[in-house]
Amino acid sequence: MSPPFKTLLVLPAYNEQEALPKTIASLQQLPAGFEILIVNDGSKDRTRAVAEALAQTSLVPCFVLTLPINSGIGVAVQTGYRFAAARNEYRYVIQFDADGQHPAGALPELVACCERGSFDLCVGSRFLGPPNGGFQSTPVRRLGIRFFCWWIRLLSGVRVTDPTSGLRCAGPNAWKRFAEFYPEDYPEPESLFWCARNGLRIVETPVAMLERQGGVSSIRANRAVYYAVKVALAILFDRLRRSESLS
Amino acid sequence: MNAERLMLVGGIGSFLLTLYWVRNRDLREKYAVGWTALAILLLLLGLFPEAIMWFAGSAHLSYAAAVLFVALGLIYIFSFVLTVSLTRQYRNQVRLTQDVSILEERIRRLEQQLHERT
């Protein structure tokens, strides 16, 4: 029996030739209805060749898009949303890191969580589980995450625990809008805030994150301050915009 | 070198630079119009320095701080317009990049289907 709806898993990948095989292997047990999209963000290594080879052998339907130039995480993820919009056959679109930090086992629960409560966005939070449940990032990053929690709550009234989490399941109200407008760099807190201020229903579910299996983070130590200031300002600017119609 | 000669040299220099970049297609004609006008203005002011004295007197810009203020204001406006233009260009570039990748994947899939049929 075919599943009632399809879900697209978007994996933005920049120089992830080492981590990608393990990540795709971890997704092979996904139930029917899931499809994978690897967005190769103009990688300089063999990510494209590795991704195309993996797509050929994957048991789960797997597509590969290659951006001709490196465009940043936000553009890569938005390409996935645009791909979903172009195919017009998915109910949910899930963002999933290609570096192996996200557990594949959490994916059905993310979708089920959206389905149960008719939520528009379900975010996998590393801070909702038991205190030592999984990798919880460095102390400096945790400080930044707490700041963004406070900032989002101050400006939208919505309480979240992990606004920088890249593991998130978006329903049609969210991803169809993301296909049109999505922040270019460091997109997670800003896009979450957009959902919050426009009255979309957001929920978090506990997820035990893993340490990355290869590659490097898009947020380098020397860019952390710029990241915090840029995202905080972007959220503030977004607060000043009018509410958007979701029709 | 006095101010008049500096303006003459600046005018000739910016005129030549504009020509060079337009010839190499590094500068669009649309923008070259503005830069050529500026080069001509500099040349004219270098050739007729009394014109700038007349303008400064009539606009009450005869003291240095006021001139600096006007110059900075012009640079600010120009830079602002430039970054707005860059933002628009960037957005267009992103859209095109994404569409290229989606179409490329579609072509590859169609080619594969065609190959499987034959």
Image (spheres, helix red, strand yellow):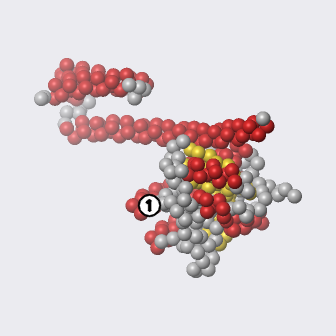
Element at label 1:
loop
Q: Is residue A76 above or below residue A96?
A: above
Q: Is residue A212 above or below residue A176?
A: below
Q: Is residue B72 left or right of residue A53?
A: left
Residue A187 image position (x, y, % from top left): 55, 55
Q: Quadrant of the N terminus of chain A?
A: bottom right
Displayed quadrant of residue A204? bottom right
Give the letter of the chain under mark 1. A
Q: Is residue A156 left or right of residue B8?
A: right
Three-letter amino acid code at the position of disc 1: Arg
Residue A121 image position (x, y, % from top left): 67, 60
Q: Residue placed farthest to the left in the image?
A: B1
Q: Going 22% across and 40% down the picture, which residue do you hit?
A: B65
Q: Is residue B34 above or below residue A133?
A: above
Within 10 Å of disc 1 (Cα), the crowding (few <14, some 14-19, many 20+) is few
Displayed quadrant of residue B58? top left
Residue A166 visible somewhere in the drawing:
no
How many badges with numbers are in the image? Answer: 1
Q: Nearer the viewer, residue A59 or B58?
A: A59
Residue B69 visible somewhere in the drawing:
yes
Residue B22 image position (x, y, % from top left): 38, 24
Residue A109 image position (x, y, % from top left): 72, 67
Q: Is residue A146 left or right of residue B83?
A: right
Q: Is residue A179 above or below residue B99?
A: below
Q: Going 38% across and 39% down the picture, which residue do you hit?
A: B79
Q: Nearer the viewer, residue B53 or B2?
A: B2
Q: Going 59% across and 64% down the picture, which residue do you hit?
A: A100
What residue would you read off at disc 1? A220
